[in-house]
Amino acid sequence: MYVYMGHMAYENTKPYEDFFWKKNKIDLVFDHVEKVETGVKSLHLKSGNRIDFDTLIIATGSRSNKFGWPGQDLQGVHCLYSYNDLLLIEGDTKRTNHAVIVGGGLIGIELAEMLLSRNIKVTFLVREADFWNNVLPLEEANLISRHVRSHHVDLRLLHELQAIQADEGGCVKSIVTHSGEVIECQFVGLTVGVSPNIEFLKNSGIEIKKGVLVNEYLQTSVRDIFAIGDCVERTYDLPGRRTIEQVWYTGRMMGEVVAQTICGEMTKYEPGPWFNSAKFFNIEYQTYGNVWPTLNPEEEDFYWEHPSGLKAMHIVWNKSSLQFLGINTFGIRLRHECFDRWLREKRDVTFVMENLREANFDPEFFTRHEDEIVKSMVLKFPFLNLQHPHKLLQK
Ligand SMILES: Cc1cc2nc3c(=O)[nH]c(=O)nc-3n(C[C@H](O)[C@H](O)[C@H](O)COP(=O)(O)OP(=O)(O)OC[C@H]3O[C@@H](n4cnc5c(N)ncnc54)[C@H](O)[C@@H]3O)c2cc1C
């Protein structure tokens, strides 16, 4: 998105300088694996070439979902995943005045921000009653909806795409919603989630379901073949974690784990407490531990929102043991290492609130809000018996 918006050059998105690969004796091959022959340990490439392997690590990421809508492959309909998608978007938005984005998640909101940066009018169709409500609790979903609308996005909750219609030239001219409303547009962004990119593994003998199935060493069902990143589906449970996790952080951790194993140090994938971060227009979002969209019966929560509607914090703990379970924060930066440690140490919520200042990671001269947050929490939960709330507030 930042390349499209002119904040970065394409070169700045490369993880390493071009000389890195050769220097580190890594052969970069620009080709497409079409088939994996596990019996003879060989890859068939689109170019017709083959590569034999001793160990294979599958890291083929995701592909954007499309759900069979009429018109979904017309000129002017785009997903946002790869650099190639970006180039196609760049080409088509030159002739776009009005765009419709379908699907309210992180990629949809990024695409909305991109298009607005080119003065393109954006209508955003979200099937659910609240924005990203399979992840965000209602308070946060409302905060983000208000923020999106404040950027002049025409956000339509409870709206579904029915079909995309073409002009005589085969380009997008409008969409039709489930209620029959026709919205004229020259661009449609389909941002309705991603799925593991594993089509090419069918019939390879490697077990797949939604993703490539792996055990705790990230080994697939076939010896010497591992999988990491977005394309992985874990066959075992980890508390508070989904079996498919399509975020950058988990991919990196999985890579580190498999590197240990193939270098002779069998290492389990134990990612610890969940964390993630993103940005919704001007609002930075971080989450540590688990703040589920709906509170579990054994959980208690406290939500604080700044009158500006641009900052918020949501804290969840266990009702009986007071063990801290998770935090969402908007517009206030918190240190990952503090929350990771406190979650691993199973600290209680009073400890977390008494030490909230230590976790703040806002830039210098940013207004601090820990006092307000703690004060309003003490008012709502006097029985929490924050041991030294006054001392805390005087720090
Ligand atoms: C717009 C957008 C915004 C995102 N923002 C965030 C964010 O803020 N935070 C976050 O944590 N995550 C974010 N993500 C998710 C994050 O990008 C992914 O989780 C991460 O890139 C997954 O890494 P990966 O290595 O598993 O797969 P990828 O990065 O997708 O890499 C897969 C690679 O495999 C190649 N490949 C695929 N099939 C084949 C084949 N058959 N043969 C050869 N090569 C093949 C692909 O071309 C690609 O180079 C975002 C994703 C998108 C699309």
Image (tube, rainbow, N blue to C red):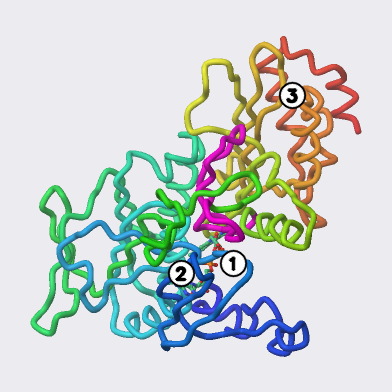
Q: Which of marks 3 and 1 precedes in the sequence?
A: 1
Q: Residues within 10 Å of mark 3 (few under 14, many from 20)?
A: many
Which secondary structure, mark 3?
Answer: helix
Which secondary structure, mark 1?
Answer: strand
Q: Residue furthest left?
A: 168
Kind of residue sitting beneath label 3: Val
Q: Which residues are magenta?
A: 221-249
In front of the other: 179 or 76: 76
Q: Is residue 8 left or right of residue 76?
A: right
Q: CA distance from mark 1 to mark 3?
A: 44 Å
Q: Residues within 10 Å of mark 2 (few under 14, many from 20)?
A: many
Q: Who's the residue at 48% across and 78% down the image?
A: 83
Q: Is residue 313 visible?
A: yes
Residue 113 x %, y %: 46, 66
Residue 357 x %, y %: 82, 39
Mainly helix, strand or loop, the magenta region?
loop
Which residue in the protein does label 2 denote?
Answer: 36
